[in-house]
């Protein structure tokens, strides 16, 4: 049979992936963040490499090692991640937003360490830019844009809502209320949604799931003749 060699499926294709959490500083020694491990994004980067792609991995602070051969761009805040994403996205064929971007950042970052004061503390936060929505809104050199959605309820409804509102091509939804799956876990299960279709990827380790996600993306690109 004439099945292509795995390492050539994404030859000449550039994939940019965001991964991990972002850190939003409060002062020089403190930040607000989340529990994202970066595992799913790093698994996608490694799968894309195996398929022969050129991979830019824009990563928030994580403890895992980037696969050999990726172009690793380390960032901390959502603003830094946005700047890197907008620099690389127009040079990419596929953009996958796997990062758990902090939705808000402190309105003001204190220049000096904040001293303990009264019994309550109020921090005013402002909304961060929606990185993937900005990528999807590119009018020139817009990549095939894939988002992730971690939900604890109404998974399909919320995922479809994000697909539409952010004008994505595809979204990978996971139900993080399912025990042992999602954030920080080694296994996950995903439902992939397009505006007119969906595919269930049953529980598997993140590396196998990443490969399936990339195969689904490749099928779409092929059918669109890109
Ligand atoms: N995302 C992003 N920039 C943000 C927030 C989210 O690029 N400021 C991306 C994520 O990387 C993911 C997708 O948007 O690909 C969905 O993220 P999610 O947090 O589920 O969606 P939100 O729009 O932030 O909605 P909410 O957190 O209220 O569910
Ligand atoms: Ca969010």
Image (cartoon, helix red, strand yellow):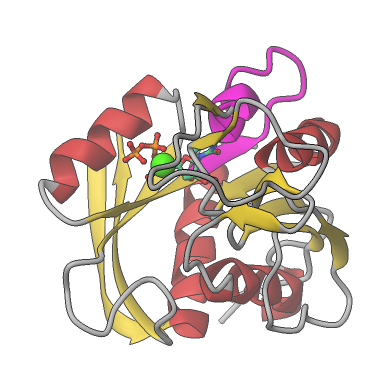
Q: Is residue 139 visible?
A: yes
Quadrant containing ligand 1: top left
Quadrant position of residue 137: top right
Question: Horizontal and vertical percent for residue 164?
Answer: 33, 24
Toward the left, the furthest residue is 154
Q: Quadrant of the C terminus?
A: top right
- The residue at the point 24 percent across, 49 percent down is 198
Residue 101 falls left or right of residue 26: left
Q: Is residue 18 visible?
A: no
Quadrant position of residue 144: top right
What's drawn in magenta, residue-wise? 129-146
Q: Nearer the viewer, residue 192 or 181?
A: 181
Question: Horizontal and vertical percent for residue 107?
Answer: 61, 25
Question: Horizontal and vertical percent for residue 129?
Answer: 59, 26
Q: Quadrant of the N terminus?
A: bottom right
224 part of magenta stretch: no
Toward the front, the furthest residue is 118
Quadrant position of residue 56: bottom right
Toward the top, the furthest residue is 139
């Amino acid at each position: 049979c004439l099945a292509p060699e795995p390492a050539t499926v994404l030859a000449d294709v550039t994939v940019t992936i965001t991964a991990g959490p972002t850190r939003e500083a409060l002062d020089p020694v403190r930040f607000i963040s989340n529990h994202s491990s970066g595992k799913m994004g790093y698994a996608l980067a490694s799968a894309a490499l195996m398929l022969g792609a050129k991979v830019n991995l824009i990563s928030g602070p994580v403890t895992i090692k980037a696969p050999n051969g990726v172009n690793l761009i380390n960032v901390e805040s959502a603003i830094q991640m946005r700047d890197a994403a907008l620099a690389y996205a127009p040079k990419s064929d596929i953009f996958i937003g796997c990062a758990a971007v902090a939705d808000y950042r402190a309105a003001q970052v204190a220049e000096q360490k904040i001293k303990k004061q009264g019994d309550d503390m109020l921090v005013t936060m402002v909304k961060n830019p929606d990185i993937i929505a900005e990528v999807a809104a590119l009018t020139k050199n817009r990549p095939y844009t894939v988002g992730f959605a971690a939900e604890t309820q109404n998974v399909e409804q919320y995922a479809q809502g994000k697909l539409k509102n952010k004008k994505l091509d595809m979204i990978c939804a996971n139900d993080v209320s399912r025990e042992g799956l999602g954030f920080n876990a080694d296994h996950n299960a995903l439902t992939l949604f397009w505006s007119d279709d969906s595919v269930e990827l049953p529980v598997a380790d993140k590396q196998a799931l990443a490969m399936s996600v990339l195969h689904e993306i490749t099928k779409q690109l092929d059918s669109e003749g890109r």
